[in-house]
Image (cartoon, grey):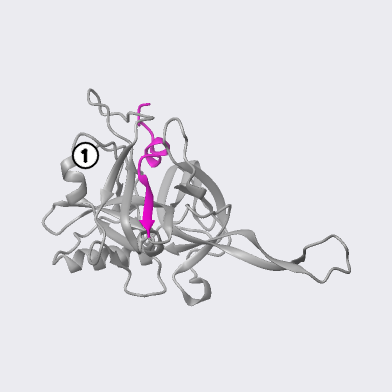
Amino acid sequence: MNIDTVAKMLFFATVRIENHGANGTSVGTGFIVTATLEDGSQCPMLVSNKHVVAGAQRLVAHFIPRKPEANVPDLGQGLAVDLPTGPGTYIGHFDPAVDIAVMPLAPTLIPLVGKVFVQALPLSLLATEAPSQFIDAIEEVTFVGYPNGYHDPQHLTPIARRGVTATPIELDYGGNPVFLIDGSVFGGSSGSPVFLFNRGTYASGPNEITAGSRIVLVGIVAQTMMRYAQLPVFEDAAATSHAKLAQELNLGVAFNARAIKEAIEQMVTAAGRSLAAVASGAAVPHPSPAP
C-alpha cells in the first residue's frame, strides 16, 4: 500500500493504546502530532485523553512497522511499544474538566527510527492555526480510531468513521471547549482525532464554494452521550421490577482545537521550550517520510 493520498495518511496517524491498570485493561486511541519549536527542531507528541492514559501500570502503544526495504507500512505486522508511565510522563490540560493529555514522543521514537511507519499530523492542521478558515455550523466530520478496541484484524489499521457536527464548532457547548458530533462514538474511540476532510469542493464562505481539498484538525473525541432508562424486566405491563439500561444517543463529545493547542503549549512550556510561529492557512499536507 503506497501512502500517496491524505486519506491513506490518516490511517497511520493514530495508535491503539492499551492501558493495563489495577482494574484491568482498557483500550483507547491516540494520534501523533509534530510541532516545530523555536529553534527549528521537530517535537513529536502523542495526543489522547487523560482517562485513556491515567492510572496505567503499563501503557502500550500499537504501531505498524515499516518495511525494511521501502518506506511503506508492513501491514499485518504489529509493533507493541511500551510508553512511559508514572508522574510527569504526560501533561494533562490545566483545566480538570478538559480531558486532553499530551505525551512527548521523541524518547520513544528515536530508538525506533526506520522501524515504525508513522504519518504525524503537522501542528499547522489545527483549526487554531488557520483562524480565517470558514467553518459552517453544520459540517461533515471524519474521525479515526479504535471503536470498542476494533481495528482491521488482518492489516491492523484503525477504523475511519463519519458524522456531522451536532452543535457549531465555534460555539463552546455548555460553556466548555467542546462541540457535539452526530455520529457513532463508542468506547475505544476516545482520543480519536476529528477532521474536516473534504475532497472535490468545500464551502469557503457563507455563499462561496471552492474547488479542491481541505483537511482541518478540529477536535478530539472524549466520550459518548448516554441516556439512562428504567425498563420493565418482564413484558407484563403490570410488572414492577425494572432494570436501569444505558442507551447510546449517537452523540459524541469532542474537545475543540483550542483546547488541544492549549495542552500542547502547556507540554512544550513545561519542557522550557516554545512553539515556532505557524504560517497561516490550512494547507493539505503531503504524506511524510516515516521516522
Q: Determine the residue positioned at 25% across, 25% down.
A: 70
Q: Quadrant of residue 267?
A: bottom left
* Element assignment for label 1: loop
Q: Quadrant of residue 241?
A: bottom right
Whether residue 209 is visible to the viewer of this picture, yes or no, is no
Camera-side residue of 9 and 184: 184
- The quadrant in which the C terminus is found is top left
Question: What residue type is disc 1 on?
Answer: Pro
| Residue sitting at the far top | 69
Q: Determine the residue positioned at 39% across, 38% down.
A: 6
- The quadrant in which the N terminus is found is top left
| Mark 1 crowdedness (10 Å alpha carbons): few <14, some 14-19, many ≥20 | some
Camera-side residue of 95 and 228: 228
Q: Percent position (x, y) of residue 140? A: 54, 51
Q: Which residues are magenta?
A: 1-21
Q: Is residue 83 left or right of residue 193?
A: left
Q: Determine the residue positioned at 89% across, 69% down.
A: 238
Q: Determine the residue positioned at 38% across, 34% down.
A: 5
Q: Is residue 13 magenta?
A: yes
Camera-side residue of 155 and 241: 241
Q: Percent position (x, y) of residue 136? A: 52, 59
Q: Quadrant of residue 232?
A: bottom right
Q: Is residue 9 magenta?
A: yes
Q: Percent position (x, y) of residue 131? A: 37, 62
Residue denoted by label 1: 291
